[in-house]
Image (spheres, rainbow, N blue to C red):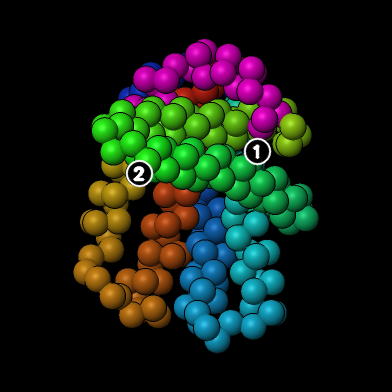
Amino acid sequence: VTYYIMKSLSIKEIFLNSFKYTISDWVAIVILGIILTFLSILNNFNRDINIIMWVAITILSLIEMGYSFKIIEQTLQGSTKPPIFRNFKELIIHGIKDTIVYAFYFTLMLIVSFLLISMIHSIPESSLIGIILAIIVIGFIFLLLFVSLINLAKHDGKLRYAFHFRELYSLLKRIGIGRIIIVYILAMLIEYLLIKTFITGENIPHMSFVAIIRNLIVTPFLVIFTERTIALSAFNKI
């Protein structure tokens, strides 16, 4: 992996850099695509899934999440190339940590949603206030999730740093809430446009050519591109 010291980038530079970074290593895209293709095939069995297939799905999912973590980690270190697929045990461990982080913050969102829905049902007049509070609180938790993944990568995957809330809040202020929201919205918009451009129609047969291209190239491209943009939004601000 090549490293160099990058300056803090503008929003435009983040996306241009992320695009160049993603297409700089088609081997990484194809390997990740093969993993995602196998995941798609296994998930397609639905009710016919057995314990062996469940284990395979779990391992492949953890490898994909662990690889996403490595993209953020190495980007924060100044990498110019996607991580090399190696040490799958390490990728699985990082995938488990990411799963714990996501589970915690999404559970937090569910609890807040439940409490606010209960408030709205018990006090109908508070429905508008409840909706506004839900948007604000859930949005803030989402921002914490965003910076928790960055802080986790910053500290070599030490899980406790994903829950250092004072440090996360400080990191959130340094990066800038507006910057995070703009980067995330633009990344999701690009993802939507790419999917609409390359994957058209509904109920595409699972093993069709279009489905294979989606899993083998488009989806892994989007995974690498999105994780890169997330990491670059925080580069030189942590």
135 relative to 64 in the view: left or right: left
Residue range highlighted in magenta: 161-186
Q: Amino acid at mark 1?
A: Val
Residue 192 rendering spot, x and y as whole percentages: 29, 49
Q: Quadrant of the C terminus?
A: top right
Q: Is residue 47 visible?
A: yes
**Residue ID for mark 1:** 1
Say if 163 sits above or below 170 in the image: below
Of marks 1 and 2, the one in the foreground: 2
Specify whether residue 173 is painted magenta: yes
Q: Amino acid at mark 2?
A: His
Residue at horizontal 43%, vertical 65%? 215
209 relative to 154 in the view: left or right: left
Residue 33 rendering spot, x and y as whole percentages: 50, 62
Residue 168 rendering spot, x and y as whole percentages: 60, 22
Which mark is drawn over residue 227? Answer: none
Say if 30 sits above or below 101 in the image: below
Residue at horizontal 30%, vertical 43%? 190
Number of disc labels: 2
Query: Mark 2: few, some, or many residues within 10 Å (few <14, many ≥20)?
Result: few
SS class, disc 2: helix
Quarter of the rendering containing residue 139? top left
Q: CA distance from mark 1 to mark 2?
A: 55 Å
Which mark is drawn over residue 121? Answer: 2
Specify whether residue 100 is painted magenta: no
SS class, disc 1: loop
Residue at horizontal 52%, vertical 42%? 111
Residue at horizontal 45%, vertical 64%? 216
49 relative to 16 in the view: left or right: right
Residue 75 rendering spot, x and y as whole percentages: 58, 32
Quarter of the rendering containing residue 51? bottom right
Q: Residue furthest front?
A: 122
